[in-house]
Image: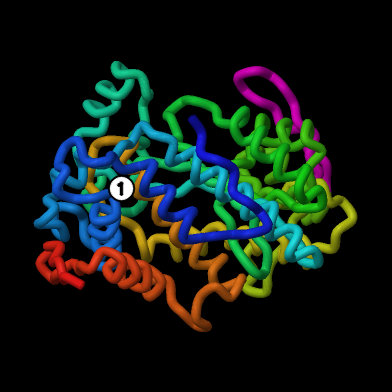
Amino acid sequence: MRPQAVDTMNLDIDDMRNTFFKISLSAGYHNAKYSVMQIMLMILACIRGKESFEEGAKAPSAQTLRDRLVLNSEWLAHFHDCMWHLAEHLVQLLRRVQWRISIDETHVPFFGHREKLNALLAAKGPGRLVLGYRARTPGATGSFGFLVVSLCCCKIRLPIAIWPIREGQPYEPWVEQILQRLLALVPRAIVLADRGFGYTQFFLMLERLEARYVVRLAVHSNTIKKKIERNQRRFAYWMTDRKTGEKAFLIVRVVCDSQGQRYVLATSEEQALLPTLLTWYGQRWDIENLFKDANRVLLPTSSRNPRMRLYCVVLSVFLYTLWQVGRLKRMLPKGISLRSFVKRILTALGKTMHCTVSQVGVIVHHPP
């Protein structure tokens, strides 16, 4: 049964957060000594200390925390529901701002035998989820990748949807559903993406949706290279899918920034000035900054379980989003940092349950 929809008129970020934990934690079948709120308290304490369960939890133990997590529950659906209803609310609240939709991948490093784990995951059904990309991390043999669609403006960055990337599996059908819904909410929003999305099927999807877009191209085609060499700043180009033979008709604009960096952009905005296109493309960094900021409250893990990796990423961006909304709606003290926001939650939980987490990772009770 899916969680109830969030009331867009009365946003309760505490209820959103608590429901997420209630859905993702068991009631105590493994160890009835600790309540759901106490397990929640310990998980947040690990996040505050930037420690994994193994480093930051003694009582309850790391194994107890793992046992109490229900990774096949409705927590991901609840996250998506919350993000969508926040989007509906904020689009109504911020009617005069320009919205943009950014799409990108985020990766968390994997250390171990990548092919062995992929074979195990493929045999069990989830598919090959450990990618070859190493995220520039020393010792990493691959990474778990997550595709993120975000809705951003000058006031806030919302991670609307997150999905694990499976090796060799196209994700256009999933992205198309999300974009279709978003473009119905904000029809004038521009879709922004980097070179990794500059391929035929992605452009055909944008064409079907009649979306406005600015997407950077990787210059592999000799046709494009020759046009750039002839100093052409605007030209048409037919991009062909090598597997299916399908073609996408693109308008390509070539623009340089003040440092001389060249950008080759495919865009639906044929008449836009080159500086305007460059400004729009630069706003794609919204999603990069979203990843960077959310990592400040990332629960560290070396788990081989893909659902655990997904849980940690979703929890970090969830807390980051609630912090943003709390500040925007003035539910939080002015100037409160993201990590102070987590500390504030810990303090409030401790007062409710009359307990704290000691420096050695033990829940200490304080009778009222």
How many marks are shown on the rendered structure?
1
How many other residues sit within 10 Å of disc 1, few (<14), some (14-19) or many (≥20)? many
Residue 212 in percent (x, y) is at 79, 47
Residue shown at 71% from the left, 32% from the top = 205
Location of mark 1 (residue)? 109
Q: Main secondary structure of the magenta part?
A: strand
The residue range painted magenta reads 235-251
Residue 70 in percent (x, y) is at 31, 37
Residue shown at 76% from the left, 59% from the top = 92
Residue shown at 61% from the left, 71% from the top = 329
Whether the magenta-drawn stretch holds residue 243 is answered as yes
Element carrying mark 1? strand
Q: How is the image coloured?
A: rainbow
Residue shown at 70% from the left, 49% from the top = 191
**Which of the pair 251/183 is nearer the observer?**
183
- Looking at the picture, which amino acid does disc 1 mark? Pro
Residue 16 in percent (x, y) is at 49, 53
Whether the magenta-drawn stretch holds residue 200 is answered as no
Q: Residue furthest bottom?
A: 334
Q: Please tell me whether residue 59 is drawn above or below residue 84 in the rendered image.
A: below
